[in-house]
Image (cartoon, rainbow, N blue to C red):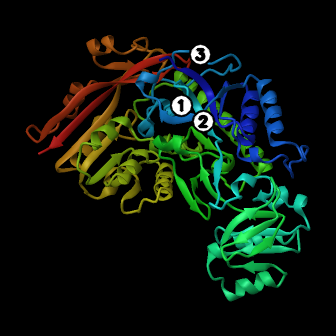
Amino acid sequence: MQTITYDVVIAGGGAAGLSAALMLGRSRRSVLVVDSGSPRNRFADHMHGVLGNEGLSPLDLLRKGREEAAQYGVTFAPGQVTRVEEAHTDTAHTDAAPAGAEAASAEAAAAAPDAADAPAADGIPPELVVHLSDGRRITTRALVAATGISDELPDIPGLAERWGRTVLHCPYCHGWEVRDQRLGVLATSPQSLHQAEMIRQWSPDVTVFSAELGALAPQTSHRLRSRGVVLEPSPVAEVRGEGEAISAVVLADGREVAVDAIFTAGRPVPHDSYLADLALDRAEGPFGSFLSVDFSGRTSHPRVWAVGNVANPMANVPLSIGAGAMAGAAANGVLIGWEFDAASPAQTEWPESTSAEDWERRYADSDGVWSGSPNRVLADVAAGLEPGTALDVGCGEGADAVWLASRGWRATGLDVSATAVERAARAAADRGIAPEDARFVAGDLDALDGESFDLVTVSFLHSPAGAPREDVLRRAADRVASGGHLLVTSHFSMPTGVGDAGEGAEDAGGEHAAEHGAHNHGGQRFLAPDEELEALALPTGEWTTVLAELRPREVTMPNGSPATLEDSVLLLRRA
């Protein structure tokens, strides 16, 4: 099945999703909005508190929003997103996105010399594959999740069928319309007590049905009664009335309490199960578990944003519109940055050696280069080893060390850049990893004071600071404990357009690479596994070769075309 590539796929066509789509469409991005047509507020006839749209029907707002976004080339698909995963080699681009996006997918093929943290080119994470309910697969460079929530109401006859009409949840949205009427508050959680205090602002006649909360503390009861709020501890058995109107709440003991409208808060259930494969960070709050996002709506995955009620169950329409606009602009900004990052290696030579000061400037002059994913070779190899102690030489901002620590290793990351090490430590702390399970050291191997490790990994060390590459690798090998492993991952072949235009730059890898062995790009010599082993000149009889192979990797060139590069993988076991 062919896949179509978009710059951004938006899951959900409510206020938040359409606001993001409008910003991205105006940014000349190719955008697909996948919409099931069932927004959370579809039960209400009118919206309130929405500047410029006071009293408008929620469905009319969405109709206007779709028309506005469509003016800028945004396309729409009915249905649902059923699953999102990172792209693999079998999901390379095959079709172009529809007209409307002139910004090409400029993510380049090869990692920069310091890309130990990077799963793809220049620290740019893999694209995403979006599975739709109609069976189609869509490849996207970014995803905005705006699929909202469902309100799980108490199972009381007469309640759910009046939801959004006379059974309400937000006094700012509906309080004015029922002001001075007989209002009930059906408590569902401790937060309902705050809701009861709020409702008192719109009417002096408020009854709180508090059975779900059990016996209230005396000070709580006194606080509510001090402003005339009536407390009714008997369970609610039924809500009665003609049509959408409410006349009374029937209690379990048979009594009836006259009310005209009921405010309650159902249990919010976020529609985010389709993101399960990405294992996004979550945050526990008073309303349950929701996706954890930053100020722009970005999740723990660098290509995924979540906005509106799917991330914030308290957001009303104006807040959701604002969150969508922020996420749309943020996603566009990230894509712009990646496009420039991907284009720049074509202008960059590969130095034989770079000073520690140069590496420090490399990190200090940027906001961060970590993609958030570990090196693929390391992940594959470490999965087959018993967790123990590990050392990542040239750890950068810590992706590999954090990944190892999250899987039971006691990991140490070592890098000459103090800035990179500080960021790595923060990243580990942000993921709840204890300092003793993931520590980070600034300096060279001498800073470790003779320690040995069960696994020492060195990834893409093509520009060591202040020492010949082979010397660094030998010193790393000396840190491997008896019975431990040394893993060295290096670039071997490069597609056209990566590195400079020096000798060998025209080779696209594959057969030519296998035939001619080491390549030379801008003065940097890339070794095959057997050449790597020979150059290391480790003591005879002390090491066993476990793996010595070339592994192909599918990438995307700056012009958007797929390409293949090869990584050299050398895994040795110490006797």
Q: Residue at x 66, y 59 (%)?
A: 266
Would you name the residue on which mark 3 appears?
A: 96
Question: Which callout, 1 or 2, points at the residue further toward the start of the chain?
Answer: 1
Q: Residue 403, how many percent across, how many down?
A: 39, 48
Q: Nearer the viewer, residue 172 or 241?
A: 241
Q: Residue 446, how many percent across, how many down?
A: 31, 53
Q: Are marks 1 and 2 in contact (CB under 8 Å)?
A: yes
Image position of 384 (left or right of 335) = left
Would you name the residue on which mark 1 appears?
A: 130
Secondary structure of the residue carrying numbered label 1? strand
Whether residue 560 appears in this view of the structure is yes
Would you name the residue on which mark 2 appears?
A: 143
Q: Nearer the viewer, residue 515 or 380?
A: 380
Q: Residue 477, how many percent across, how many down?
A: 23, 44
Q: What's the CA distance linking mark 1 and mark 2?
A: 9 Å
Quadrant of the image containing the C terminus: top left
